[in-house]
Image: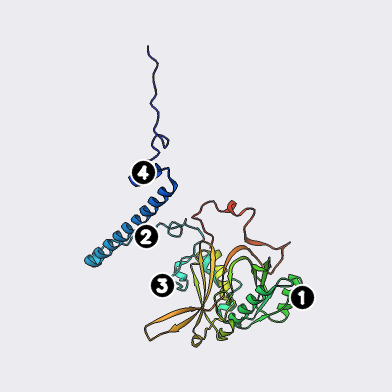
Amino acid sequence: MGVPTTMATPNATHFPHEGKSTEEVQLEQIRNKLRRRELATKLKRQKKKDKRQRQDERKKEAQALGPDAPPRLVPKTLEALREPDVTTVVMGGAEPGAEPDPTLMDEETHWDINHDEFQDYFAKAYQPKVLITSADNPHSRTIAFMKELSRIIPNAEPMWRKNSSMKKMVRRSIENEFTDIVVVNEDNRHPNGMIVSHLPNGPTAHFRLSNVKIAKDIKKDWRQISSLRPEVILNNFSTRLGHTVGRMMAALFHYEPQFQGKRCVTFHNQRDYIFFRHHMYDFKSSEKVRLRDMGPRFTLKLRSLQKGTFDSKLGEYEWIISGRRHDMETSRRRFFL
């Protein structure tokens, strides 16, 4: 009686070249590094050419078929494949930046938007007055960044820290009727953090600050920035946490822009990174217009959102990155803002 034999299940080790083109397989078998690099460049160029050809064919097909054309292909990006979030706020209207439609939101979300700490601002009950300061003994780059922020934000006043504690500064700001306080932190002579606190009842947000480009870095003069109130554009803040952060950014600026100043500031959220840009409209004609970058540029990454004003010991946090950043990132397609 013979011993029964078992058939091995095929796996990736049996077919190492599965899913690869013939050119890629041949490329892997070339041992000469220079030759392999040369062929890899040609292969990449050919793939790019084939992709462009397919795009042109689809474009011609869409023009020929008209309304009967197949739908456009959606690129498989992390944004397009984003995991759904239970706190996503449904927006009314088809245009980006449309006001929330109460008929499409649940009662809890509608109540939060109408009763949060920024309700007085959006009801136009007061005009924002912002205090901008920094850590103790700021260096030249941080000072220049503060000057440009005070020029961009209407009714903003820069002030030296003078070794004051954060809590003492908050109390003095409330006494002097400031509505918001912005603190720029630095490390190795470069700005690396920002704290934004809404007065008098919070909330307080702590951001990591990176990729700071002041006006001098992009060959612009901050003195050319007009004092007229800019238009504020908020992009892609979709969750309830994102709405809170977006409303906090909007509350720094006056709610009625002066369009004759032709300025706009943009807070664009992409994969939980908030990109700030400051532009001026340059009208070439009644139909042509372009955006002229005025600076500064910087990127914000939310580290924590705290209820009330700044309190590092007894403060209650609505959201915070605890431990290592990757402990919260259970998936590359999950975003919080």
Q: Residue furthest right?
A: 163
Q: Earlier in the sequence, mark 2 or mark 4?
A: 4
Horizontal and vertical percent position of residue 194:
64, 69
Location of residue 116 by image quarter: bottom right
Horizontal and vertical percent position of residue 119:
58, 75
Which structural element holds mark 2? loop
Give the residue pinned by disc 2: 74
Q: Residue furthest top?
A: 1
Q: Which mark is residue 162?
A: 1
User: Callout 4: 10 Å neighbours few (<14), some, many (20+)?
Assistant: few
CA gap, disc 2 and disc 4: 32 Å
User: Callout 3: 10 Å neighbours few (<14), some, many (20+)?
Assistant: few
Give the residue pinned by disc 3: 95
Q: Earlier in the sequence, mark 3 or mark 4?
A: 4
Give the residue pinned by disc 4: 26
Horizontal and vertical percent position of residue 20:
36, 45
Which structural element holds mark 1? loop
Give the residue at x 44% y 47%: 33
Determine contact: label 3, label 1, CB under 8 Å: no
Q: Earlier in the sequence, mark 3 or mark 1?
A: 3
Q: From the viewer's perspective, is the residue at label 3 or at label 4 nearer?
A: 4
Which structural element holds mark 4? helix
